[in-house]
Image (cartoon, helix red, strand yellow):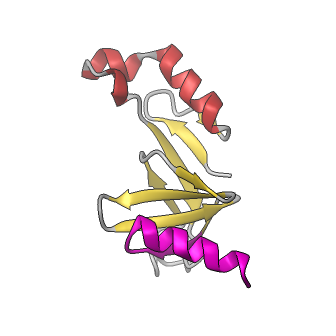
């Protein structure tokens, strides 16, 4: 499961629904940015390709994107329109060049 970290309090919540509720109750993003949809929680998940010394990216990926739940996985659009991470149990499983590619990869896992 991916965890969400409030950009103001730093509080970590691993339940997406609980994180959204806490964010709405806090309201700080909405007040400061004057936009109700601006509540930003950060999802953090493990990069399994990381090697100590900074090779193959950071140890953990972070994104403010809202995940798409699909067949027990979460799909995060980490780089707008370009890169989609497929996450399960808090670990990135693969990276795809489109949301459809991410869904196709998940579908293929069911047939293996």
Q: Position of residue 37 (x, y in %)?
A: 35, 27
| Rendered image quadrant of residue 86 | bottom right
Q: Quick one: which residue is furthest to the left in this view?
A: 34
Whether 49 is drawn above or below 69: the answer is below
Question: Number of callouts in the render?
Answer: 0
Locate residue 25 relative to residue 89 in the image: left or right: left
**Residue at horizontal 44%, vertical 28%?**
8
Locate residue 20 relative to residue 65 in the image: left or right: right
Q: Which residues make up the magenta segment?
A: 93-112
Which quadrant would the C terminus be assigned to in this image? bottom right
Whether 75 is drawn above or below 6: the answer is below
Locate residue 89 relative to residue 21 in the image: left or right: right
Instruction: Find out whether residue 36 is within the magenta segment.
Output: no
**Residue at horizontal 43%, vertical 16%?**
27
Q: Position of residue 76 (x, y in %)?
A: 47, 57
Identify the main secondary structure in magenta: helix
Q: Quick one: which residue is furthest to the bottom in this view?
A: 112
Q: Position of residue 15 (x, y in %)?
A: 67, 38
Instruction: Find out whether residue 103 is within the magenta segment.
Output: yes
Whether 39 is drawn above or below 96: the answer is above
**Residue at horizontal 69%, vertical 57%?**
72
**Residue at horizontal 62%, vertical 32%?**
17
Q: Position of residue 96 (x, y in %)?
A: 44, 74
Of the pair 106 and 61, the residue shown nearer to us: 106
């Amino acid at each position: 499961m991916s965890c969400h970290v409030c950009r103001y309090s730093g509080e970590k919540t691993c339940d997406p629904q609980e994180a959204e509720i806490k964010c709405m109750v806090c309201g700080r993003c909405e007040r400061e940015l004057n936009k109700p949809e601006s509540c930003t929680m950060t999802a953090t998940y493990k990069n399994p390709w990381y090697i100590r010394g900074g090779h193959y990216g950071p140890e953990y990926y972070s994104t403010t994107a809202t995940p798409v739940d699909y067949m027990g996985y979460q799909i995060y659009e980490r780089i707008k329109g370009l890169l989609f991470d497929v996450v399960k149990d808090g670990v990135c499983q693969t990276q795809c060049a489109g949301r459809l590619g991410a869904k196709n990869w998940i579908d293929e896992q069911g047939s293996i």
